Amino acid sequence: MKTEVLIEEQPRAFIQRQPPDARKQLRQALHALANGGVFPELLEDELEGFYKLKVGRHRLILRMDSSRARPRFKVVFAERRKVVYELFSQILGLEQS
């Protein structure tokens, strides 16, 4: 079954700024998600309810909409692995800087 994948502005801009090889990997991962070839991992603790998709040195943060007939993921944030969870927590207001 195909999965609908929506991409918000921040992750779209992040992907577009990446060098060609990384951009290609990120796009391939999104296509694999849409075609059911990969499934993101559920995050825990304060980021419960979000999912992560590992793509090389990058991470995509997703939210799943389970109220629809077919699965749908929305990519809500993307960044390098080193800083993705800290930055995303700050955006959500879960961590004080």
Image (cartoon, rainbow, N blue to C red):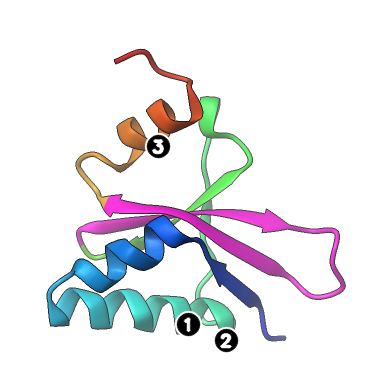
State the CA–CA distance, disc 1 to disc 2: 5 Å
Instruction: Using a 10 Å C-alpha cutoff, classify the residue at mark 1 as few (fewer than 14 neighbours), some (14 to 19) or many (20 or more).
Output: some
Amino acid type of the residue that numbered disc 2 sits on in the rendered structure: Asn
> Left or right of 42: which side holds 29?
left
Q: Where is residue 43 in the image (x, y as percent from the top left)?
A: 51, 41
> Which element carries disc 2, helix, strand or loop?
loop
Residue labelled with disc 2: 35
| Nearer mark to the viewer, of 3 and 2 | 3
Q: Where is residue 24 in the image (x, y as percent from the top left)?
A: 25, 83
**Magenta-drawn stretch contains 72:** yes
- Which quadrant: the N terminus? bottom right
Look at the picture and state if 61 lies above or below 92: below
> Left or right of 89: which side holds 64?
right
Residue labelled with disc 3: 88
Residue labelled with disc 1: 32
Look at the picture and state if 56 lies above or below 35: above
Over which residues does the magenta segment extend? 57-79
Which callout, 3 or 2, points at the residue further toward the start of the chain?
2
Amino acid type of the residue that numbered disc 3 sits on in the rendered structure: Phe
State the CA–CA distance, disc 1 to disc 3: 24 Å
> Left or right of 92: which side holds 96?
left
